[in-house]
Image (tube, rainbow, N blue to C red):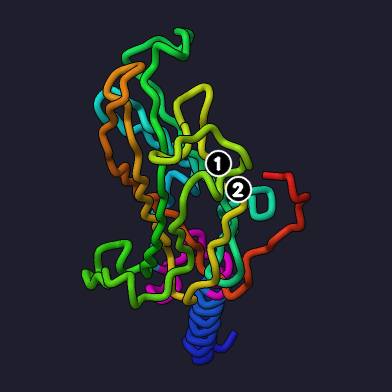
Amino acid sequence: MNPARTPTRRRIATGVGAALALTLTLSGCSSLSPESDPTPTPSASSSPVPVEETQFTRDGTFQSHINVDGIDFVYTLYPTKSTPRTHEWFPRGNKFFTITMTAYDLDRKIRDDFKTKRKVYLDRISIASTTATADQVSGKDDSDDTDLSTAVQPYELNAQAKRITWDPEPLSKKKYGMLITSPKGSFELRNQKIGPMDLDVRRVTLRIAARVYVQREAGSSSYDRHTIRQDVPITVFASAKATSVAKIPVDAN
């Protein structure tokens, strides 16, 4: 062996080992592709402002109990079979709901004779509607257009209750309206249409006001007038698609 060549061989071996180590290191780094990253960080632009679900949307119904002088006024709203999936209520297209209103005399038991209960009559019912964007719902935009006389409303109503209720011949008094004391009377309005809205709308609120007359005591000829108000917020989900509407029989709900 030529001693003069030994250092050269050692340098060559050392260089080859270093190059191999570098290759393995680089190869190890490139084996973890971006798709296999277990905790990707989403960009801010991919996270829309969350919209809180309302009772109507979450439960598929809305019900409230309003106590006035011992009378329980019960509002119930629910989507009809034409648009039953509340998580698919979008700004475009029509959305349909049914509303009922009934009164219970809390001074008497449910099974007590009807003649012992105070009579409640519904005269007129009006419903206005307001809309809100995601920023307005979340409180980031505190602007509030309350001029309903000039704003476009996706739903509105103002009528005598006995003329629009489902029952064509409700028990009624000419001066006070239709009877809504349970179990003999109830107001029911079916398949009401909420019309299209702007694409950025994320909530529509129905603002109900019902003018009622409450008998002061069972058998009395004296009545007190009240206005029973209730707001019903409904979530509207982001989509460019129109809300799907199914055809239903005329007597369906």
Query: Is 184 positioned to the left or the right of 224 in the image?
Result: right
Rendered image quadrant of residue 110? top left
Image coordinates for residue 121, horizontal then vertical, percent = 41, 34
Q: Main secondary structure of the magenta part?
A: loop
Q: Are marks 1 and 2 in contact (CB under 8 Å)?
A: yes
Residue 138 visible somewhere in the drawing: yes
Q: Is residue 79 above or below residue 29?
A: above
Are there few (<14), some (14-19), or many (20+) residues within 10 Å of tag 2? many
Q: Is residue 4 above or below residue 188?
A: below
**Residue 184 rendering spot, x and y as whole percentages:** 53, 24
Q: Is residue 105 above or below residue 192?
A: above
Farthest residue to the left: give it. 142
Instruction: Tell me what residue is drawn at x 51 percent, y 63 percent.
Output: 237
The residue positioned 59% from the left and 56% from the top of the image is: 96
Residue 59 appears in the picture as rendered: no
Tag 1 residue: 188
How far apart in space, not on screen, are marks 1 and 2 (Cα)?
Answer: 6 Å
Q: Amino acid at mark 1?
A: Glu
Q: Which residues are magenta?
A: 30-48
